[in-house]
């Protein structure tokens, strides 16, 4: 009796195995050692990317699950660029879902609203436009509604300069529109009341506001990336 190989299994069954082995419920942080590094790191994500090394056909089939069906997260354009460079252009072209932080703006009486120094938000979008033609869903995270107002450069409730808020949000939305495959933008904010003007403006852009809670590991990952 001839031995049965993995590729002898029906495609439907192989697809179930790929989904079970390669698709994670949580966002995958784009720090290379955590993704393809030590076994202990991969086990935390419950992923088995080594299946891609079995042969060419399996690699082709499985890559569509590993890169196309997972949600990735990054806090810097440098870690995103490094990751995409390591996986190569074919795999990078499959990525559809990325999570990263809301940009920080600063207000100056002479120059108006400008991006904060070292803010990599637009740089991340530039990388996506160049390397990820299938990018369909952006998930933008903020730590709290108050911090979102801080990201916009001033305390909205005190300054009342809503025209500057509109200017900053318009700039962000225009940048989103440079991604031709983008279908949806979700803004993750903890369940604390969001400023009504900001909320209405985001809805006008058709961004989805998603109330969330952060767990301890997500906070730790965020602060480690900032160091």
Image (spheres, rainbow, N blue to C red):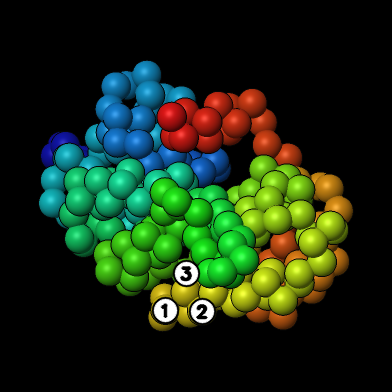
Q: According to the image, label 3 marks what residue? A: 136
Residue 22 is left or right of residue 33, and the answer is: right
Residue farthest along the front direction in this orientation: 110
- CA gap between label 1 and label 2 equals 7 Å
First-in-chain label (1 vs 3)? 3
- Which type of secondary structure does the marked residue at label 3 adopt? loop
Where residue 78 appears, as percent x and y from the top left, is: 31, 47
For residue 90, which quarter of the picture?
Answer: bottom left
Asked whether residue 59 is in view, the answer is: no
Q: Nearer the viewer, residue 51 or 156?
A: 156
The answer to whether 122 is drawn above or below residue 79 in the figure is below
- CA gap between label 3 and label 2 equals 16 Å
Q: Are marks 1 and 2 in contact (CB under 8 Å)?
A: yes
Mark 1 surroundings within 10 Å by alpha-carbon count, few (fewer than 14), some (14 through 19), many (20 or more): few
Tell me which residue sits at (17%, 40%) in the image. 54
Q: According to the image, label 1 marks what residue? A: 178
Q: Which image quarter holds the C terminus?
A: top left
The answer to whether 25 is drawn above or below residue 206 in the figure is above
- CA gap between label 1 and label 3 equals 12 Å
Residue 176 is left or right of residue 61, and the answer is: right
Where residue 122 appears, as percent x and y from the top left, is: 42, 63
Q: Nearer the viewer, residue 216 or 13?
A: 216
Q: According to the image, label 2 marks what residue? A: 174
Mark 2 surroundings within 10 Å by alpha-carbon count, few (fewer than 14), some (14 through 19), many (20 or more): few
């Amino acid at each position: 009796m001839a031995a049965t190989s993995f590729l002898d299994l029906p495609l439907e069954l192989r697809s179930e195995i790929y989904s079970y082995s390669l698709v994670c419920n949580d966002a995958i942080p784009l720090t290379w050692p955590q993704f393809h590094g030590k076994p202990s790191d991969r086990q935390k994500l419950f992923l088995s990317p080594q299946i891609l090394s079995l042969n060419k056909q399996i690699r082709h089939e499985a890559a569509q699950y590993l890169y196309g069906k997972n949600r990735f997260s990054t806090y810097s354009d440098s870690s995103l660029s490094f990751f995409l460079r390591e996986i190569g252009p074919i795999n990078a072209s499959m990525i559809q879902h990325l999570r990263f932080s809301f940009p920080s703006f600063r207000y100056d009486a002479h120059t108006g609203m400008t991006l904060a120094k070292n803010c990599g938000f637009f740089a991340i979008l530039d990388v996506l436009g160049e390397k990820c033609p299938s990018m369909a869903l952006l998930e933008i995270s903020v730590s709290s509604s108050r911090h979102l107002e801080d990201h916009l450069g001033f305390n909205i409730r005190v300054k009342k300069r809503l025209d500057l808020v509109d200017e900053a949000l318009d700039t962000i939305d225009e940048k989103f529109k440079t991604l031709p495959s983008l279908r949806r933008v979700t803004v993750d904010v903890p369940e604390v009341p969001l400023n009504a003007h900001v909320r209405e403006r985001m809805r006008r852009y058709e961004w989805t506001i998603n109330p969330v809670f952060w767990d301890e590991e997500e906070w730790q990952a965020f602060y480690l990336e900032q160091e």
